[in-house]
Image (tube, rainbow, N blue to C red):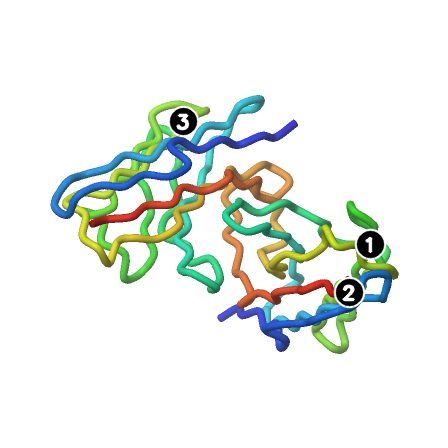
């Protein structure tokens, strides 16, 4: 149980375009999802907390207009990187928070902006 | 502010040998502690967690961790390492509220290399 999927697993886009990453909880409902960014050989950096039906809460220093998060249903949260630039290239990981306080992580999405 | 320190960036261990990964945390209240493992290009898998009770917790894949409040530590151990244990390991701390919205703070990670 508690499986989280992400789509796509990897994406290459041109500078200036937008890309959407989906995070789905497959066998449970997730009222809270988290979005992380991970640079090579580094730890996870929390970008934002996404709550179903309400606006996401962004961590300090994260541009909310650049990283649009939508949590429209209890099983789906999306992260849209708008007007992507090469410095946005990274590994993006989502997780679903459960009532027990732990998080279940998706497999991640590798974004490369050319 | 809460923080997690994993002092060892890399650890190399021979297959069959024991492994111990260190984790120290700074937290203003009773913490909720986790160990996650990440294989290259993958998401994180929960190995074990500690909230309360017995300070020695058992996890998946033969891992265990011991919570020592006096030392603010939550070290991960495995008696005999397998080649498949080569991965990145992350210690994390969160509030002991057991809420879905619990934010986690991650340590910098320890990369484990297993020699044949």
Question: Image quadrant for the N terminus of chain A?
Answer: top right
Q: Which chain carries label 1?
A: B
Q: Nearer the viewer, residue A45 or A42?
A: A42
The disc at residue B67 is 2
Q: Mark 3 points at which residue?
A: A76
Tags 1 and 2 in contact by the CB under 8 Å rule?
A: yes
Q: Which chain carries label 2?
A: B
Residue visible at 15% across and 47% down in the picture: A15
Mark 1 / mark 2, whichever is N-terminal: 1
Residue visible at 73% across and 66% down in the picture: B74
Horizontally, is A7 left or right of B93 in the view? Answer: left
Residue visible at 63% across and 59% down in the picture: B89
Image depth: mark 2 or mark 3 in front: 3
Q: In the structure shown, which secondary structural element does the residue marked by tag 2 occupy?
A: strand
Q: Mark 1 points at which residue?
A: B57
Distance between the Cα atoms at labels 2 and 3?
A: 35 Å
Q: In the structure shown, which secondary structural element does the residue marked by tag 3 occupy?
A: strand
């Amino acid at each position: 149980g508690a499986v989280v999927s992400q789509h796509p697993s990897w994406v290459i886009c041109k500078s200036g375009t937008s890309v959407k990453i989906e995070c789905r909880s497959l066998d449970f409902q997730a009222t809270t999802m988290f979005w992380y960014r991970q640079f090579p050989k580094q730890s996870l950096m929390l970008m934002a907390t996404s709550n179903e039906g309400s606006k996401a809460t962004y961590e300090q220093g994260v541009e909310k207009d650049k990283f649009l998060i939508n949590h429209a249903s209890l099983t789906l949260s999306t992260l849209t990187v708008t007007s992507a630039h090469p410095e946005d290239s990274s590994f993006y990981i989502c997780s679903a928070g459960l009532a027990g306080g732990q998080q279940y992580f998706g497999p991640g999405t590798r974004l490369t902006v050319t | 502010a809460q923080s997690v320190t994993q002092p060892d960036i890399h650890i190399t261990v021979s297959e069959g040998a024991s492994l111990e990964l260190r984790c120290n945390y700074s937290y203003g209240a009773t913490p909720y502690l986790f160990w996650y493992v990440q294989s290259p290009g993958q998401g994180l898998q929960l190995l074990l967690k500690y909230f309360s009770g017995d300070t020695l917790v058992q996890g998946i894949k033969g891992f265990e961790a011991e919570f020592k409040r006096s030392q603010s530590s939550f070290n991960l151990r495995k008696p005999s390492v397998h080649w498949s244990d080569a991965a990145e390991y992350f210690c994390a701390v969160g509030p002991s509220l057991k809420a879905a919205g619990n934010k986690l703070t991650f340590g910098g990670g320890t990369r484990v290399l297993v020699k044949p």
